[in-house]
Amino acid sequence: MYLTTSVATQVIFTYSLRYKQMGNLKIEDGRPDRIEFYNVGRDDMLGVSEPLPNPACIEAHRSDMKAYMGQAHSVVSLICSHLDKQLHIAPGTLASFHSIDKPSGTHLRMLRGQPQICSDFDFQVPR
């Protein structure tokens, strides 16, 4: 799933709060970054909040996004259970702070970088 130029233009104007255009931020040496991204909210995809408008390329894969976010939550829950044991706290303590059926603000950030020539391969991600 790639954002084409025409879709990217649509995204910029319609979904500007969840989209960052390439070059909007600077890296440490002052050059523009080479990354664009779009954020997809877990609460939106899992139905915890009202559905948000997304570009057609996202909506066409809503079920894939939902499955991915469910699997990612399972991984987080597993990590939390191991941390509970290592920290000698009650099982489920950490996972209780990240319930899948409550609003969380968690999101999937899809990144896209332009192809670069090998001598200029300095994948610039803003900090």
Image (cartoon, rainbow, N blue to C red):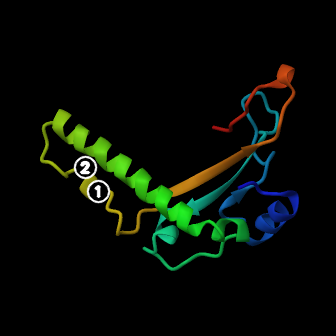
**Which residue corresponds to the image point at 40% horizontal and 68% vertical from the top-left?**
103
Residue 94 — which label? Answer: 2
Q: Is residue 106 visible?
A: no
Q: Is 59 displayed left or right of 67 in the figure? A: right
Quarter holding residue 117: top right
In percent of width and height, residue 30 lies at: 79, 32
**Which residue corresponds to the image point at 58% horizontal and 61% vertical from the top-left?**
40
Give yes or no for contact between labels 2 and 1 (Cβ–Cβ under 8 Å): yes
For label 1, the residue is 97
Quarter holding residue 125: top right
Residue 70 — which label? Answer: none
Q: Which type of secondary structure does the marked residue at label 2 adopt? A: loop
Q: Specify the quadrant that holds the N terminus.
A: bottom right
Q: Amino acid at mark 1?
A: Phe
In percent of width and height, residue 112 lies at: 73, 46
Q: How many marks?
A: 2
Q: Amino acid at mark 2?
A: Leu
Please tell me whether residue 70 is drawn above or below residue 63 in the rendered image.
above
Q: Is 21 displayed left or right of 67 in the figure? A: right
Quarter holding residue 122: top right
Q: Is residue 26 visible?
A: yes
Q: CA distance from mark 2 to mark 1?
A: 6 Å
**Which residue corresponds to the image point at 55% horizontal and 55% vertical from the top-left?**
108
Which of 127/14 is in front?
14
Residue sticking out furthest to the bottom: 50
Q: Specify the quadrant that holds the C terminus.
A: top right
Q: Which type of secondary structure does the marked residue at label 1 adopt? A: helix
